[in-house]
Image (cartoon, rainbow, N blue to C red):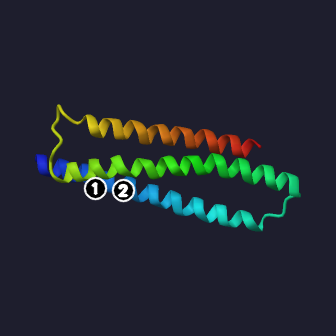
Amino acid sequence: PTRRSSDLGLFHMLLLTLALGVSFLISQTRVWLALDTVQLPSTARTLYLFSFGVVTGLHAVHVLGGFVPLMVCAVRAFREAYLSYDHAGVTYCAMYWHFLDAVWLVIVSVLLLL
């Protein structure tokens, strides 16, 4: 493949990652709104909603923060700024997003066990 097609492939994958992040935030917002209808005892409801809101809210804030480097990488990929030996921005961005994936798996596991 040519360099341009390779950079466009990277660009499209970065846009897909952005779309998945937006989808996550939309689905998480729907879950937060649906929690209003859950019938829990008042003390359990307060503790559960607070814990759930803090944990998932912090994760959502980090997802939002990850959009900035993701968009920077996408723009740079579209402009063909990355070389086979110089792509640290993409590497660091991928590390950040994979870390968020791992944290989310831990969060979901813990919440399912509660």
Q: Which residue is mark 2?
A: 16
Between 67 and 23, the one lying in front of the other is 67
Q: Kindly identify the amino acid type of the residue bearing the numbered disc 1.
A: His
Task: Please tell me which residue is depicted at 33% across the width and 56% down the height of the picture.
Answer: 15
Q: Kindly identify the amino acid type of the residue bearing the numbered disc 2.
A: Leu
Quadrant where the image shows the C terminus: top right
**Which disc, if any, is residue 110?**
none
Say if 6 sits above or below 92 in the image: below
Q: Give the side of residue 26 with respect to residue 45, left or right.
A: left
Between 51 and 18, the one lying in front of the other is 51
Q: Give the side of residue 44 with respect to residue 59, left or right.
A: right
Between 65 and 16, the one lying in front of the other is 65
Whole-percent x, y for residue 65 in the image:
44, 48
Q: Residue furthest left?
A: 2
Say if 102 sits above or below 27 in the image: above
Q: Give SS at disc 2.
A: helix
Q: Give the side of residue 72 with respect to residue 25, left or right.
A: left
**Which disc, if any, is residue 12?**
1
Q: Residues within 10 Å of mark 1 (few under 14, many from 20)?
A: some
Task: Please tell me which residue is depicted at 52% across the width and 50% down the height of the picture.
Answer: 61
Q: Residues within 10 Å of mark 2 (few under 14, many from 20)?
A: few
Count of marks placed on residues: 2
Q: Give SS at disc 1.
A: helix
Whole-percent x, y for residue 58 in the image:
57, 47
Residues at marks 1 and 2, CA–CA distance in whole angstroms: 6 Å
Whole-percent x, y for residue 25 in the image:
52, 59
Q: Are marks 1 and 2 in contact (CB under 8 Å)?
A: yes
Task: Please tell me which residue is depicted at 48% across the width and 49% down the height of the picture.
Answer: 63
Q: Give the side of residue 77 with respect to residue 64, left or right.
A: left
Task: Please tell me which residue is depicted at 79% across the width and 64% down the height of the picture.
Answer: 38
Whole-percent x, y for residue 37 in the image:
76, 68
